[in-house]
Image (cartoon, rainbow, N blue to C red):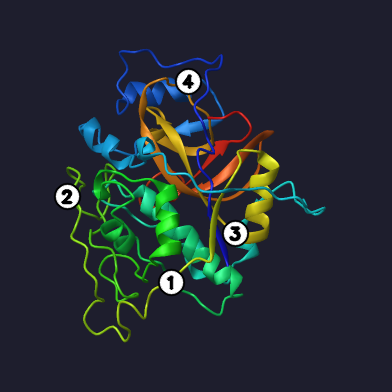
Amino acid sequence: MKLLLVCALFVAAVQSRRLHPPHVQPLSDEMIDFINRLNTTWKAGRNFDRNTPLSFIKGLMGVRREINYRLPMYHHEEIPNDLPESFDAREKWSYCNSIHLIRDQSTCGSCWAFGATEAMSDRICIHTKGRVQVNISAEDLLTCCDTCGAGCNGGDPAAAWEFYKTEGIVTGGLYGTDDGCQPYYFPPCEHHTVGPLPNCTETKPTPKCVLQCRKGYEKSYSEDKHYAKEVYSITGDETQIKTEIFKNGPVEADFTVYADFVQYKSGVYQRHSDEVLGGHAIRVLGWGTENGVPYWLVANSWNEDWGDKGYFKIRRGNDE
């Protein structure tokens, strides 16, 4: 089974565009109004309480690029003749339960682990044609991968995939479920203004690595491990990325987050800020065009209340 990571799919670029004034705070109504008055390709709205510390939001951006772990590059020599103009992995592999799931990293900078384990889970289902449906544990990867970085303080997505190949990762679903060996430790929280969940607070410390499954689980920790046979990166070439997703399923990618992104609600995001908040890892599900604007379809890990029910579209081909 081939499983992979796509690094830095959306790279920061300096382009001629209107940027928000320096005095406008990222979580302010002024930022939302500024974006919406531009009549750009996307709409902004309140995703976070205006009093949320910016340090907390930056803490959610858990990609540690200074680790700079490298995977071997893979190049598709054969490009499918039927590569479509638009594609949604949720439709092609609708029988995969994991592919429809939006997770919540909660009060932890674990996006690097979530993007990886989400794509791993999807690909296990896809490559077994639905016979094996599991959620690979973000908890196990987050807490036990010493080479990945600093847990809730960030990690390297590439190192996460190498860990999957060499050490293996057990199963585990969302907090409070009996899904798999090690469900997620942190409960969901309200990143946003109004909702049924308790409010998110400061970023929490990384839990300890536990080399055993939850009480009552039918397998031992070692028996529950899943491994990749091969891991690799794909270049930033658009056709290569499309081919990989079309053939093998969703991929993990990371991108630079600018201050306006946290207010995304709908449409195709393109940045109108030069204030960097950090690096964020996500899962790419497909691509398409909306009102003439090409995009990548992406699943975030800030629960379903954020953005467009947990998803967002980001402009394709412009390196946002």
Residue 73 can be seen in this image: yes
Mark 3 element type: loop
Q: How far apart are marks 4 and 1 (CA)?
A: 49 Å
- Point out the tag, 2 or 3, that comes first from the N-terminus: 2
Residue 300 can be seen in this image: no
Residue type highlighted by circle 4: Arg
> Which of these two is toward me, 68 or 124?
68
In this figure, which residue is indicated by the disc labeled 2?
A: 205
Q: Residues within 10 Å of mark 4 (few under 14, many from 20)?
A: few
Q: In which quarter of the image is residue 180?
A: bottom left
Residue type highlighted by circle 3: Gly
Mark 1 element type: loop
Camera-near label (1 vs 2) is 1
| Residue visible at 51% across and 77% down in the picture | 132
Mark 4 element type: helix
Left or right placement of residue 316 versus residue 56 in this view: right
Q: How far apart are marks 2 and 3 (CA)?
A: 32 Å
Q: Residues within 10 Å of mark 3 (few under 14, many from 20)?
A: many
Q: How crowded is mark 1: few (under 14 residues within 10 Å), some or many (20 or more)?
A: some
In this figure, which residue is indicated by the disc labeled 3?
A: 249
In the rendered image, residue 207, in percent from the top left (x then y), is placed at 19, 58
In this figure, which residue is indicated by the disc labeled 1?
A: 226
Q: Do the residues labelled 2 and 3 touch (CB within 8 Å)?
A: no
> Which of these two is toward me, 5 or 138?
5
Camera-near label (3 vs 4) is 3
In the rendered image, residue 45, in percent from the top left (x then y), is placed at 39, 34
Q: In which quarter of the image is residue 181?
A: bottom left
In this figure, which residue is indicated by the disc labeled 4?
A: 37
Q: Residues within 10 Å of mark 2 (few under 14, many from 20)?
A: few
Residue type highlighted by circle 1: His
